[in-house]
Image: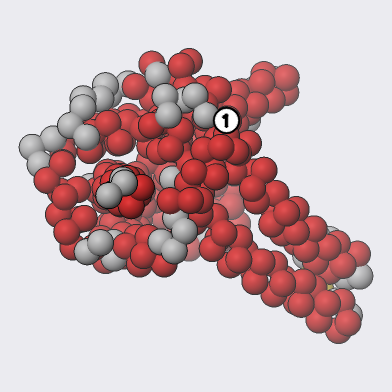
Amino acid sequence: MVRAEMRKEAREALKGRWGKAIGFYLISTIIIMAILAVSEIPAMDTVLYWVLFVAYFAIMMPISYIMVLSFMKYKRGEDIGLFDVILKLPENFVAGWKIVWGIFMKMWIYWVALMVLFVAAIVIMTANSELNALGEIIYIPAWAAFTSLLLFLATFIVSIFAAMKGLHYIFTWEVMFDSGNSLKGKEAAEKSEELMQGKRRKFFMFMLSFIGWAFLAAVVGYILIAIVMSVIISPEALTNQTILAQELETIMWWFVPVIGMVFSVAFMWVSPYISVSSVVFYDRLVEGNKKEEKPE
């Protein structure tokens, strides 16, 4: 598979249809950020806060699944609705969580190891440290610092292996969609693993080929954030850390979603391009497997 050819195929699929793809991506992001902002309103009742938090967590995986399958449809010449991320939620809710469970069943040992290592590092470091009135560490014994450093290093190494293993299951969403949501989550994960045998490096290098576009979008995003900061933050706060902290505390509940939305705008050309390109890679894998299985 030639990376340039796959990127070209993705651009051909988007040719004359960029507007709909970008619109779907931005509306999906706005909905996600709006739910996040509402769940973080400071004056909200505690019970309502937790209800919204759980609701946000519950729909995030199905929404992610709907975004993947929507770009699959788009690449294959089908139409998508701008509000499909909400309209298609009921029929894809269970499938989205089946995918999460399936991947968890294949990778749980990595996630448990990461959690144990990270928590152990934090506990050792904080339990043996002296803190000031602000809760900042002012002294930590050499043995505790060294042990924590080793544990953080181990966490980093395990994270790399987990990411490498996770590439096996990168197409679990696509496999589930092609099955008509009929597979169990673990079955979809296993089919993705079969497709990706010997292909993880190729996929990683293919995604890495978009780094120039991603870097450019990130630069645009940081410029837009600087503009937004100059509008919503007072000039005094930009030169005084105390005032800045006070102002951020009062707006943080909506500031984080706004920043997320700003970055989404910066990536509005890149994200659909990468999403459709990923589908191209998947479709070629499936096509290649069918040719190998076809009897002579």
Residue at 83% x, 77% y is: 147
Question: Residue 273 vs residue 126: left or right?
Answer: left
Residue 66 image position (x, y, % from top left): 41, 29
Question: Which residue is denoted by mark 1 in the rendering?
Answer: 184
Residue 56 image position (x, y, % from top left): 57, 28
238 vs 176, nearest the viewer: 176
Up-down: is 186 above or below 246? above
Residue at 84% x, 69% y is: 125
Up-down: is 207 above or below 107? below
The N terminus, quarter of image? bottom left
The reply to whether residue 228 is in sight is no
Residue 222 image position (x, y, % from top left): 35, 58
Residue 204 image position (x, y, % from top left): 40, 63
67 vs 206, nearest the viewer: 206
Question: Residue 30 vs residue 169: left or right?
Answer: left
The reply to whether residue 269 is in sight is yes
In the displayed orientation, state which residue is furthest to the front: 296
183 vs 74, nearest the viewer: 183
Residue at 16% x, 50% y is: 9
Residue at 20% x, 55% y is: 7
